């Protein structure tokens, strides 16, 4: 075989994950990005849309338009896609619990353009098991959630045949601390659970076609050689699964198809300009080797650890892809790793570990039954990652080594990020109220009644979902109907099951200080760790809860998606000495003061500390509102945070900060 290709490969599809404020503003951003050479859309939805709430719901407070675009009904979807030909565009939607609904809205928006659903191309992420494990935007219990996924797959394989109905998403597993072995094993176990669920809802002869429509969304970290090996290992396992478990023989259907966003977990708030080279190196992991090259790539912006990227920041990320594809010679060669002893060895090592871990998941009854096991395993892995960074065993430039720095000229008076206009939320509340007042309410009621009926049967839910979208139902109404049919659900936190930390030399000293302060208080020092709002990224709060438990504190941690009133009620009932709040979605300016007001109205005067992605310019207003301390990603040393919290409780209660002689 020649060491050069007869002609240069076509580049992968280039996306930018984007959306904010309103459907109109996001549409303007999409059209601008497409004019700059982006070749596919990647829609970021706001948290109310992701979790099934309208902009005027109590839980939507502070979250509307922050981490994505709000889409409350078909009118919003039509505006979002205005001027974008849906018969030609390939659209990826990062949506899970409400994926069936958003696909329904997309199909109806295409109808308005005169485009039949059979012509639509794109992907819905639609991976609910990952939401239970890592990201938290679930809405319904595991069983009904898997039914929704299976219904979508069964519907699209015949009615929307160019659509990828699910991205088995290992991306967020790595963000939650997964090792490469865990990322492979849990993603493949997840895929088995999905395919087995679909198998019950389609004719067996359709299964090869179903298998061929399953895609993956993976992560690529900065250890880019090992990350490339991970992708080759996933390709081997996927083909094995297809042949051995589902009887697939068509080579095209057996192909491991994946899109990628490179690692956001490794992006740093400190010296954020270093993130550019991290992103480039991580992009190499998914583009260098032809036999395992990504089909679609979206790169984060250099400042995503600071907040929402500006259009210029997103352009920079797109230009990185374009330089790789069009200026370098990456696309001119056959697979450059063929015959590599290093790559073959790494792949074999990862395969051995992944198969062993998949066997453990299988012993737990498969991915759905093993959610608690996998969640606690990820919490443990993430804690080990943090321990290595704290100890200096894992170097992160600018964080625990080479911390001297010049002031960045990239950071402007707004903090180097896009700040969403605070009036957007009120506008969206008014807009959804206006939509409800102008529609045919009888048609909506009938459509929702039919949806509820179908949910209680074994019928495919997609036709009723599309009919509700066409009638003008809202995201919140669709979800409420299914919540009533399926019930509510709170996912596992993994904190109680995580192993006790015994390998930290500082933990014993901290335990002694906790014991001393607890004795002075007359009872065990107790902390409440709370996540107000809809932000489901709970990795940081879980690590705080685990470390506080290991330090000897009593810990109250009830997971994600709490209202200020619920947090205040728990703090009062539990008699906690300190409250730790975590928000990464940008809703801190609204929700933190709301929580403090609720606490004080309930008669709780314990100090409040806050952690999350909080721009520097927002820290003083939070302290003015009553926050005692603010921690951001630059505060990577959880040991120091724990010492600070114990000292804060001691000071608040008149206890000496250190033991007297």
Image: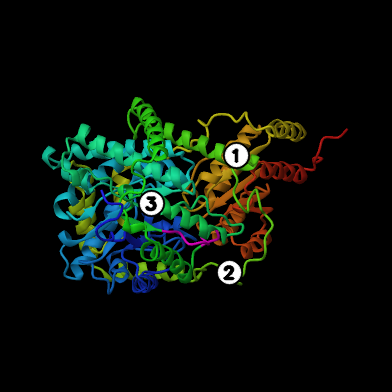
Q: Which image quarter: residue 83?
A: bottom left
Question: 389 and 426: which one is in front?
Answer: 389
Would residue 296 be found to the left or right of residue 497 on screen?
A: left
Residue 125 image point, x, y percent: 32, 51
> Going by the picture, which residue comes out furthest to the right?
661
Disc nearest the viewer among 1 and 3: 3
For the question of whether residue 94 can be seen, the reply is: yes
Element assignment for label 2: loop
**For the residue labelled by badge 1, is the local secondary structure a helix, a strand or a loop?**
helix
Question: Is-magenta flag for residue 300?
Answer: yes
Tell me if 532 is positioned left or right of 130 in this view: right
**The C terminus appears in which quarter of the rendering?**
top right
For label 1, the residue is 388
- Which is nearer the N-term, disc 3 or disc 2? 3
Find out whether the residues at labels 3 and 2 contact each other: C-beta distance under 8 Å.
Answer: no
Q: CA distance from mark 1 to mark 3?
A: 26 Å
Q: Quadrant of residue 287?
A: bottom left
Marks 3 and 2, Cα distance to the nearest angstrom?
28 Å
Q: Which mark is residue 410?
A: 2
User: Of circles 3 and 2, which is in front?
Assistant: 3
Observer-nearest of 77 and 600: 77
Q: Secondary structure at mark 3?
A: loop
Q: Which residues are magenta?
A: 299-307
| Residue at far top of view | 363
Q: Quick check: can you spot residue 442?
A: no
Q: Main secondary structure of the magenta part?
A: loop
Name the residue rendered at 43%, 71% in the picture: 427
Q: Position of residue 460 (x, y in %)?
A: 18, 46
Residue picked out by circle 3: 286
- Percent of width and height locating residue 152: 23, 49
Q: Is residue 601 above or below residue 428?
A: above
């Amino acid at each position: 075989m020649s060491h050069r290709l007869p002609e240069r490969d076509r580049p992968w599809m280039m996306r930018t994950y984007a959306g904010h404020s309103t459907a109109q503003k996001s549409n303007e951003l999409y059209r601008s990005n497409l004019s700059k050479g982006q070749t596919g859309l990647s829609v970021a939805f706001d948290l109310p849309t992701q979790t099934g709430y309208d902009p005027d719901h109590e839980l939507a407070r502070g979250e509307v338009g922050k981490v994505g675009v709000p889409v409350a009904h078909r009118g919003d979807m039509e505006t979002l896609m205005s001027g974008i030909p849906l018969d030609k565009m390939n659209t990826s939607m990062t949506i899970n619990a409400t994926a069936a609904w958003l696909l329904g809205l997309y199909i109806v928006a295409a109808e308005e353009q005169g485009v039949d659903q059979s012509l639509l191309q794109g992907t819905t992420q639609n991976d609910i098991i990952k939401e239970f494990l890592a990201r938290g935007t679930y809405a319904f219990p595991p069983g009904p959630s898997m039914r929704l996924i299976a219904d979508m797959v069964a519907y699209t394989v015949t009615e929307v045949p160019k659509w990828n109905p699910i991205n088995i998403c290992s991306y967020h597993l790595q963000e939650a601390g997964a090792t490469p072995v865990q990322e492979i094993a849990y993603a493949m176990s997840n895929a088995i659970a999905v395919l087995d669920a679909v198998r019950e809802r389609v004719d067996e002869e359709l299964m090869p076609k179903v298998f061929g429509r399953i895609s993956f969304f993976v992560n690529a970290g900065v250890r880019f050689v090992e990350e490339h090996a991970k992708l080759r290992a996933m390709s081997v396992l996927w083909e094995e699964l297809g042949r051995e478990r589902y009887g697939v023989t068509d080579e095209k259907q057996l192909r491991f198809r994946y899109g990628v966003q490179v690692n956001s977990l490794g992006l740093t708030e400190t010296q954020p300009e270093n993130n550019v080279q991290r992103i480039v190196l991580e992009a190499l992991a998914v583009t260098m080797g032809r036999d395992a090259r990504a089909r679609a790539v979206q790169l984060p912006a250099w400042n995503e650890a600071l907040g929402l990227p500006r259009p210029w920041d997103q352009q920079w990320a797109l230009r990185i892809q374009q330089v790789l594809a069009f200026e370098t010679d990456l696309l001119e060669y056959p697979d450059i790793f063929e015959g590599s002893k290093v790559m073959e060895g790494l792949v074999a090592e990862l395969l051995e570990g992944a198969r062993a871990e998949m066997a453990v998941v299988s012993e737990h009854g498969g991915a759905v039954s093993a959610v608690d096991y996998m969640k606690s395993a990820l919490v443990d892995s993430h804690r080990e990652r943090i321990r290595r960074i704290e100890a200096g065993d894992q170097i992160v430039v600018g964080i625990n080594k080479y911390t001297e720095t010049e002031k960045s000229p990239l950071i402007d008076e707004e903090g180097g990020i896009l700040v969403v206009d605070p009036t957007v939320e009120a506008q969206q509340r008014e807009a959804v109220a206006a939509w409800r007042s102008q529609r045919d309410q009888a048609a909506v009621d009938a459509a929702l009644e039919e949806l509820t009926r179908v949910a209680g049967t074994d019928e495919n839910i997609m036709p009723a979902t599309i009919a509700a979208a066409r009638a003008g139902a809202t995201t919140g109404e669709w979800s409420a109907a299914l919540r009533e049919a399926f019930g509510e659900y709170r996912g596992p936190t993994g904190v109680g099951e995580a192993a006790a930390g015994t390998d930290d030399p500082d933990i014993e000293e901290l335990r002694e200080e906790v014991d001393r302060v607890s004795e002075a208080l007359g009872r065990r020092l107790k902390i409440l760790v709370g996540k107000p709002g809809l932000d489901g990224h709970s990795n940081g709060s879980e690590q705080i809860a685990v470390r506080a438990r290991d330090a000897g504190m009593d810990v109250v941690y009830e997971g994600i998606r709490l209202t200020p009133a619920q947090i205040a009620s728990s703090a009062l009932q539990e008699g906690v000495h300190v409250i730790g709040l975590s928000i990464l979605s940008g809703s801190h300016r609204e929700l933190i003061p709301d929580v403090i007001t609720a606490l004080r109205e309930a008669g709780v005067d314990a100090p409040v500390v806050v952690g999350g992605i909080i721009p520097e310019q927002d820290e003083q207003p939070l302290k003015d509102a009553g926050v005692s301390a603010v921690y951001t990603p630059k505060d990577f040393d959880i040991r120091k945070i724990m010492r600070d919290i114990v000292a804060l409780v001691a000071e608040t209660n008149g206890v000496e900060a250190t033991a007297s002689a």
